[in-house]
Image (cartoon, rainbow, N blue to C red):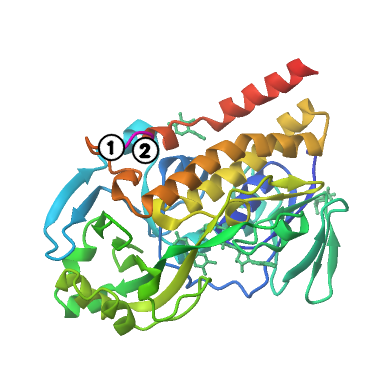
């Protein structure tokens, strides 16, 4: 029944692609997701979901994060690097009532599963939720033509869509196809991500590490930093451990390069012995070299646009990559809503221009602040201290943002100019 129904190809079935798929099907469009791999769930470690991302996920898209075993974050604690003594303890306090939605701690695999279910769910289960998205696995995009809206995959298939959404992550092919050559330099940081099962903590008599929804951090006054918290209904500890690149046994770009627990523990010889004991019991240990991407000059061209890491990869030090990808998906669905498209007389290129205007500055700021937080814990969002550096990323700035209002302002302005 929708007046402006588009055929949209989403390239990449990661967290960003799924967010966009859910938002766009709800806006009345037909969505097909193309993923290079077979969709695998058990990938990744912890992901923080700020309340403004929760607002979309739970408030508007019907994704129940509680059912997805997410935990509502209660506090953040900073420990002394060597002794583990608690040096700072910050409550998230009235965060939830202030911002209207929870700040969650999630296991990436749980989030992925919940989003995938929601994207593919039959329409009649969920009321006003449009056509279910279609998922095509084993479709690796190798080329795209933004002017034509075509996309070719390594299996020989070529498709044509009204809009191609590049949600294909940090090494995006769609980004290349629209003429962006990333300016990249290796960061001086490397990072391990790992998980520790509750059963392993039981054997160590350390289950208390996994009993409360607290984000714990060691270090951060330089590159060295360990951050972890429970997720998956208190069954897992999901963790990140940052260290200077020159100390790495091996350090490459990529999300999926395996390492061993002893390599992990040996990288942090003088850390709190409890942390070392936990590290020696880690599973799914992965190591990756961080790269600094200069902000890209644009995020759309012709009938193609970028979202998530494809549009703006950022350092993981603020844990905002996912929340920004959710907002990108939401923004796309707002500029392509029936209401906006009617106002724009169905002009897709104007809608994509608005998408870019809506997202560029906000995401660039989060990118910059994520870089700052890499070597200075005081820059980290959520840890409000009296010694806050000027211009620190605050929960207020992130969560009091009103995207609909922002879009209204942009629409009014562009109509006035005509
Ligand atoms: C395996 C993995 C583990 C991660 N672990 C964490 C974590 O523990 N904590 C954290 O904060 N962030 C993690 N991230 C990153 C996090 O998911 C992103 O920063 C954020 O959610 C933005 O998501 P995205 O969809 O833009 O990118 P991604 O989540 O990277 O998704 C991109 C998707 O596109 C697919 N793809 C790539 N190229 C092509 C192509 N040419 N054709 C078709 N499909 C393609 C990929 O297979 C992937 O499914 C992880 C990402 C991956 C891929
Ligand atoms: C979307 O899918 C529905 C149902 O399959 C179909 O009737 C409609 O024509 C499609 N819309 C477009 C733009 O192709
Ligand atoms: C983008 C967005 O939806 N922002 C919201 C963030 O949360 C605050 C408080 O709930 C809302 O006022 C904003 O609209």
Q: Quadrant of the C terminus?
A: top right
Helix, strand or loop at disc 2?
Answer: loop
**Occupied quadrant, residue 354:** top right
Q: Is residue 392 magenta?
A: yes
Q: Residues within 10 Å of mark 2 (few under 14, many from 20)?
A: some
The answer to whether the beta carbon of the residue marked 2 is less than 8 Å from any atom of ligand 3 is no
Residue at 17% x, 48% y is: 88
Query: Would residue 183 appear left or right of 150 to someone viewing this image?
Result: left
- Which residues fall within the magenta stretch? 388-394
Q: Is residue 58 above or below residue 149?
A: above
**Image coords of residue 76 (percent x, y):** 24, 50
**Occupied quadrant, residue 244:** bottom left
**Image coords of residue 232 (percent x, y):** 36, 64
For this rendering, which residue is in front, 84 or 117?
84
Residue at 52% x, 47% y is: 324
Q: Quadrant of the N terminus?
A: top right
**Occupied quadrant, residue 331:** top right
For this rendering, which residue is in front, 93 or 261?
261
> Can the viewer see residue 61?
no
Q: Is residue 203 above or below residue 225?
A: below
Q: Is residue 37 above or below residue 173?
A: below
Residue picked out by circle 2: 392
Q: Which mark is residue 388?
A: 1
Q: Which mark is residue 257?
A: none
Residue at 48% x, 45% y is: 368
Helix, strand or loop at disc 1?
Answer: loop
Q: Is residue 160 above or below residue 42?
A: above
For this rendering, which residue is in front, 96 or 77?
77
């Amino acid at each position: 029944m929708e007046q402006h129904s588009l055929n949209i190809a989403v390239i990449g079935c990661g967290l960003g692609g799924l967010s966009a798929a859910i938002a766009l099907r709800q806006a009345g469009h037909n969505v097909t997701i193309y993923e290079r791999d077979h969709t695998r769930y058990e990938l990744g470690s912890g992901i923080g979901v700020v309340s403004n991302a929760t607002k979309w996920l739970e408030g508007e898209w019907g994704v129940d994060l509680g059912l997805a075993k997410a935990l509502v974050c209660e506090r953040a604690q900073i420990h002394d690097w060597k002794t583990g003594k608690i040096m700072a303890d910050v409550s998230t306090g009235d965060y939830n009532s202030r911002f209207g939605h929870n700040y969650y701690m999630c296991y990436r695999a749980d989030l992925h599963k919940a989003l995938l279910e929601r994207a593919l769910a039959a329409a009649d289960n969920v009321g006003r939720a449009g056509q279910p998205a279609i998922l095509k696995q084993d479709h690796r995009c190798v080329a795209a033509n933004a002017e034509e809206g075509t996309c070719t995959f390594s299996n020989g298939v070529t498709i044509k869509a009204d809009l191609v959404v590049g949600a294909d992550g940090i090494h995006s092919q769609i980004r290349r196809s629209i003429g962006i050559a990333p300016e990249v330099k290796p960061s001086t940081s490397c990072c391990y991500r790992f998980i520790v099962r509750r059963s392993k903590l039981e054997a160590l008599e350390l289950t208390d590490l996994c009993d409360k929804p607290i984000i714990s951090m060691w270090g951060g006054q330089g590159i060295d930093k360990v951050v972890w918290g429970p997720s998956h209904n208190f069954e897992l500890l999901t963790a990140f451990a940052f260290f200077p690149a020159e100390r790495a046994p091996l350090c490459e770009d990529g999300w999926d390069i395996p390492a061993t627990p002893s390599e992990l523990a040996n990288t942090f010889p003088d850390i709190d012995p409890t942390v070392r004991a936990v590290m020696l019991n880690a599973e799914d240990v992965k190591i990756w070299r961080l790269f600094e991407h200069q902000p890209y000059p644009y995020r759309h061209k012709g009938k193609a646009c970028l979202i998530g890491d494809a549009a703006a990869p950022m350092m993981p030090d603020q844990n905002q990559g996912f929340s920004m990808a959710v907002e990108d998906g939401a923004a796309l669905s707002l500029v392509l809503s029936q209401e906006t498209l009617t106002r724009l007389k169905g002009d897709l290129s104007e809608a994509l221009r608005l998408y870019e205007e809506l997202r560029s500055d906000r995401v660039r700021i989060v990118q910059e602040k994520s870089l700052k937080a890499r070597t200075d814990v005081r820059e980290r969002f959520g840890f409000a201290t009296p010694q806050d550096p000027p211009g620190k990323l605050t929960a207020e700035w992130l969560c009091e943002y009103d995207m609909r209002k922002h879009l209204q302002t942009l629409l009014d302005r562009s109509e006035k100019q005509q």
